[in-house]
Image (cartoon, grey):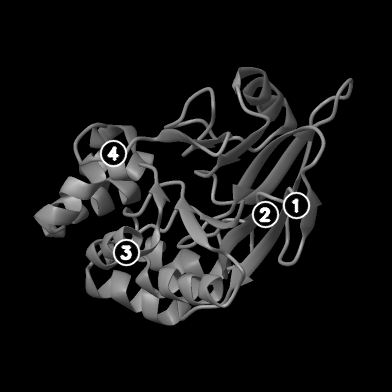
Amino acid sequence: MMKVAVISDIHGNRHAFEATLEAIADSSAQEVWCLGDLVGYGAEPDACVELAREHAAVCLAGNHDLAVTGEIPLDEFSRGASLAAQWTQEVIAPRNLAFLESLSPQGIEGGIGLYHASPRDPVWEYVVSALLAELCLDAQPNRLCLIGHSHVALSFVRHEGAVTTGEPQRDGAELDLSDGDWLLNPGSVGQPRDGDPRAGWLLLDLEDLTASYHRAAYDVAGAAAAIRAARLPDSLAERLEYGQ
């Protein structure tokens, strides 16, 4: 059994992705699993897809990836997200679009459920409350489950005979997964929304059944400048600095 770096929601942010991959390379992780949304919002979709193709052993499709491939209509997105997806469709290289088209929003690896959003709705559901997590734990066939989509580093657990509880996870937090049913969200690489602008990722030890949360500092100003240079909505650049 091995150690896996879990990442999600890169969103075309090459600066954040490269910094995260450097941190992972310096860690004990032997494999990278990505829970989707390689593109959308950010200005370097091709670089991010190529980095995922090179480094990720497992990769899911997120809702923004599915928007760019045309599987989800753009009118289901906010204005900024829709404009970014449309721009990405115009600029992305055919080979990288083909890679996105090959991905699914869910999977299973080593008995662990992988979902971009949730076990109940792999594409759209934001699991940010203990009540929603409880419903997802009822729906999931696996004791351990990895989810992305909300851009918030979170964990939810249900021990036998107890209600589901959950909490945000900060840099350096460690969890013992040996007991109970779990939903783990690594947070977002490219657009964190938990007030910490640094890229988020999770180290999962499949042998010891532990998880640790990590953050990687990156060149936020560089990523924001790329968004502005691409003439994408300024709000997409602005929010990176605040982790929102």
At 39% from the left and 48% from the top, the residue drawn is: 59
**Quick check: 14 above or below 122?**
below
Q: Residues within 10 Å of mark 2 (few under 14, many from 20)?
A: some
Question: In the visual, does 211 lie left or right of 67?
Answer: right
> Please, what is the three-letter code of the amino acid marked with disc 1?
Asp
The 10 Å Cα crowd at callout 3, few under 14, some 14 to 19, many 20 or more, is few
Three-letter residue code for mark 2: Asp
Q: Are marks 2 and 4 in contact (CB under 8 Å)?
A: no
Mark 1, mark 3: which one is toward the viewer? 1
Mark identifier at residue 66: 4
SS for tag 2?
strand
Say whether disc 3 or disc 2 marks the residue closer to the N-terminus: 3
Residue 207 picture location, percent across and down: 70, 50
Q: What number is the disc on residue 205?
A: 2
State yes or no: discs 1 and 3 in contact (Cβ < 8 Å).
Answer: no
Mark 4 vs mark 1: give the one in front.
1
Q: Secondary structure at mark 3?
A: helix
Q: Residue furthest front?
A: 1
Q: Earlier in the sequence, mark 4 or mark 1?
A: 4
Q: Of tags 4 and 3, which is closer to the observer?
A: 3
Q: Give the label on residue 208, or none.
A: 1
Quick one: 94 or 85, which is closer to the camera?
Answer: 94
Rendered view: 42 above or below 89: below
| Mark 1 neighbour density, 10 Å: few (under 14) some (14–19) many (20 or more) | few
The residues bearing labels 4 and 3 have C-alpha atoms spaced at a distance of 20 Å
